[in-house]
Image: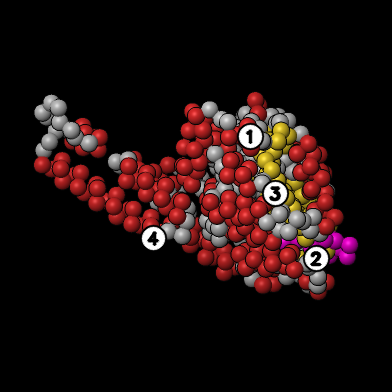
Amino acid sequence: MATGSSLSPETLFWWAVLGGGASWGLWGMLVELVVRLLLACAIVIRKGSRPAVATAWIFVVLAFPLIGVIAYLLVGESHLGARRRRLHKEIVAAFDKPQYHRHDDPRAHEMALDPSDMQVATIAGRISHSVQLAGNQARLLGDATRSADAMISDIALAKSSVHMTTYIWLDDRIGEAFAQALMDAVSRGVACRVLVDDHGSARFLRSRQCRQMRARGVRVVAALPTHYLRALFHRIDVRNHRKLMVVDGHIGWLGSMNIAAAEFAIQPRFAPWVDCMVRLDGPVARELQLLFAEDWYLDTSESLEPLLREQPTFHSDGVCAQILASGPNYDNDAVRRLLLAAIQVARTEIVLTTPYFVPDMDMISAICVAAQRGVGVRVVVPRRNNSRLVALASRGRYETLLRAGVSIHEYTRGLLHAKTITVDGQFAIVTSSNLDRRSFDINFECSAILYNDAFTSEVRRLQQSYIDASVSVSLDAWTDLPILTRFKLNVAALISPLI
């Protein structure tokens, strides 16, 4: 190779790979370029409805030889693989039946919702096939220790079954307490099934505690195993991020809490983890049972359909609630569309709390428009985040939001992990979903929408406690950031569609 040549970095890359300037090396470059161009066209077709995501992936594929192609093939598509797609068809045929979404007591379907609430209920129903059901007793718990104690108390009273799904299970004092409660339940003849994410709970699945639970009769199953050979057939980082529990088919729990103590042993410097959970006793519990049955079938091929015939108790003094499931085998965009609907119907106030705030431009625009039309929009996030990249990408959106009149609060007393939304004091959403692309497009998530002023007021008071323990972000301070800091934030915002 002649000195002083002006070969591009890509040509130099191929020169190094192929060992010189042989003609077949040139053909290799051309073939690889054609592959990248074809893949870019495929991205336009597949992701054209999400321009920011499509643009980011096209840039990666075209800018980085081989690496970009491999990256897209590994994590660019949210698909589960042929076997799980087949199982999902079987699940839909067996479980997604009208009788499992309805209750025998007609009062469960007789509720008068505010027009704004009805709009949200309608879109949630169309997305997930679930219906809003009255007659549910709802209890909000905003403390991890109290939540764990209450859940364990329900396990201690279980008579027939306990079903749990969690992303992370730690072998700590909380994990030990749950394990003992489940093993005690099995000794009373209760069927206990536990579904833990294979990645999030990898340490637990190899632990003495897990072996002991299995030996004592607790069915512990790894959800979505992440063997790397699977990357040849489907995306390996699809995760079951749900946190739910169903006891005897009548009592349901869901929210943001993993099976872990607040001091979170694997990342103690960000502790305490601040979570909230909601306990639901009533007709809507069967929606959670249905959701668990679907996930269990997906990873075990074992049908729990007979359990779905049980009718939870209707409580005449209960509230109206609705469950929304999302994930690669449901509607990937379900949570995003639900939140967009909630933002659009807001008239006076919307408050959002989340640990990971990386919304796409559509949601940024909806939030800004809401603030500009006079809605009090408050966003509460942790000041110290356990993900450096997410923190940068989140803050890269601050200036746009602040200029529109959005109030941003950074929580200072630990890692705020609670994922909640309240709208106009009328309805509340408690969810496992973060406000980021991973939760919107990739993970399996679960959300509860509660159409009740009193319950919404409880959630709003919890949110206010977060705000009171936060530092408000000032627009003036944000516009005076050093150039290097601003550069980092803008780069993170630029690549946020890939996060």
Q: Nearer the viewer, residue 427 or 270?
A: 427
Q: Report the magenta stretch's main SS.
A: loop
The amino acid type found where label 4 is placed reads Ile
The amino acid type found where label 2 is placed reads Ala
Q: Nearer the viewer, residue 50 or 212?
A: 50
Residue that numbered label 2 is attached to: 134
Closer to the chain start, of discs 1 and 3, is 3
Q: Secondary structure at mark 3?
A: strand
Closer to the chain start, of discs 2 and 3, is 2
Image point (38%, 57%), residue name = 44
Closer to the chain start, of discs 2 and 1, is 2
The residue segment tinted magenta is 310-322
Left or right, 41 with reference to 291: left
Asked if residue 313 is among those painted magenta in the image, a careful observer would answer: yes
Closest to the camera, between mark 4 and mark 1, is 1
Q: Position of residue 169 (x, y in %)?
A: 65, 38
Q: Nearer the viewer, residue 85 or 407?
A: 407
